[in-house]
Amino acid sequence: MIKAKEDFGNPDATPFVRFISGTALYPNPSLYEATKTFFERYAGDDPTPILRELVKKGLVAGQYEVLLDATWFAALSTFLLYNTGVGEGITDWQKHCLKALSLMCERPHTLAWKILKAFLLEQIDVVSGWASSWLRALGAREKIFRADDGNFYMHDDEGVLVRVVGAKPLDETRLDFIADQILWRHGFLRQILELFALFAITDDFSSNREYYPPAMKAVLSESEYQRVHHTWHFMYFDRARTVKWRPYSNLCDPDWLASDLLSCVVDTLQIDHFRKRRTEAKTPSQLWAKDPRKFQYDYVLDSGLRLGPDQEEYLEFEGTPFRWLNGTAERNAVVSILVEQVGDEAADVGRLNRMLGAQGFECPDFGAPLCIARFGPLSSEEPNENSRAQRQASEVKMTPCAIAAGIKI
């Protein structure tokens, strides 16, 4: 008996590739056809039974996996069943995803993106998950607001006005939440962008095949990874290498799609907060500016503690200045100290230890001890205002202790 040769697909006829136990499978670029087949059989209720029927598994490359011809049905299943529980039925988010999927099927993909983007912007609270988020419920209850002085306030349960540090008003929290859902690889909105990029690649490949190098393939994720995404790999000999590449069309790049969508979201802002911060930048304290020491150490705090609403604050502790850079969504807080000589900072680090200890006692909700990752000495030639830190791997743990001296801001 002669065993039939297994079909792994034609690498010259597709820009896509799947890997199963090191074996490359090349699915046909038939995402549009697979989506049409799905909608022909979809009756408007829970899509789970239909997807289970369409996603056929069998023996592939010696493993029981999704068959080559069912690759795109598996991608649609991953998209439509993303973060849904068993027995939930169809959810509101799935209904919007089905609507978005129907818009992705339009050709050319340049027109489809304009229609899809308008739909996402219109339904962004639901599609992003903000409408059902506990952050929205908490923000609506606390009613935090920004006063004319730039600080955040709220009224507690007894009606007393209190200042809030580390939280934002509801509208700003909403923008942060939506931005995360667009930029995070596992975000709800990001999944729509990742799937549309596959449609764009399919459409662009059909009309611009000559611009796709035969060795350049978009590696598809397997269904067990629970999210839609792809990475470009340069295939040669028996090796696969990850590279930074995308087709000529920007719409084939989910990162570009995310930036394009996010720019329309933040266009709703009435205040350019970045420019406002630059024009209202805090000037260094006289104690810091006139300090004769010319070397600087920077320490990154492993803490969510913020001092004031501005980007930086200048502190005075035991007659010594400190510069405190508040953390953001993309970096931790940083504390800067001045030293007389590089390598002779023991006394200054001890003072920093005591200052952080006082902060730990003043703000117990942030926990103690505070932990910081040490940055190396700055340049020995430049003054502290122009120098830059050199990273070192050592870590210092600061233990709170009782302090008689106070901290001035």
Image: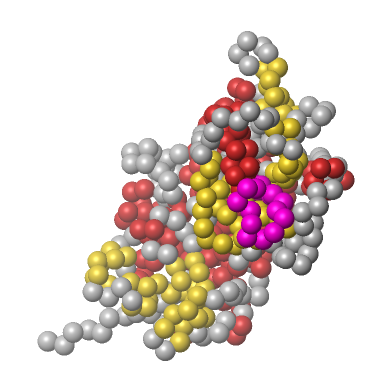
Question: Closest to the observer: 22 or 275?
Answer: 275
Q: Which color mode does the image show? A: secondary structure
Q: Position of residue 6 (x, y in %)?
A: 27, 81
Please say whether residue 83 is one of the residues in the magenta stretch. no
Question: Closest to the observer: 342 or 154?
Answer: 342
Q: Position of residue 58 (x, y in %)?
A: 25, 67
Q: Quadrant of the N terminus?
A: bottom left
Query: Which of the 4 quarters of the picture holds residue 148?
Result: top right
**Residue found at the far top of this picture:** 158
Question: Closest to the observer: 320 or 17?
Answer: 320
Vertical comparison of 42 with 158: above or below: below
Query: Which of the 4 quarters of the picture holds residue 57?
Result: bottom left
- Looking at the rendering, the stretch of residues picked out in magenta corresponds to 327-348
Please say whether residue 332 is one of the residues in the magenta stretch. yes
Q: Residue at x 26, y 84 (%)?
A: 5
Q: Is residue 282 left or right of residue 44?
A: right
Q: Is residue 124 left or right of residue 10?
A: right
Vertical comparison of 350 with 104: above or below: above
**Residue found at the far left of this picture:** 1
Q: Is residue 185 visible?
A: yes
* Total numbered circles: 0
Q: Residue at x 58, y 42 (%)?
A: 353
Question: Closest to the observer: 295 or 100?
Answer: 295
Q: Position of residue 135 (x, y in %)?
A: 56, 33
Q: Is residue 327 visible?
A: no
Q: Is residue 85 left or right of residue 387?
A: left
Q: Residue at x 71, y 65 (%)?
A: 379
Vertical comparison of 137 with 311: above or below: above
Q: Quadrant of the C terminus?
A: top right
Q: Residue at x 75, y 30 (%)?
A: 151
Q: Position of residue 352 (x, y in %)?
A: 62, 43
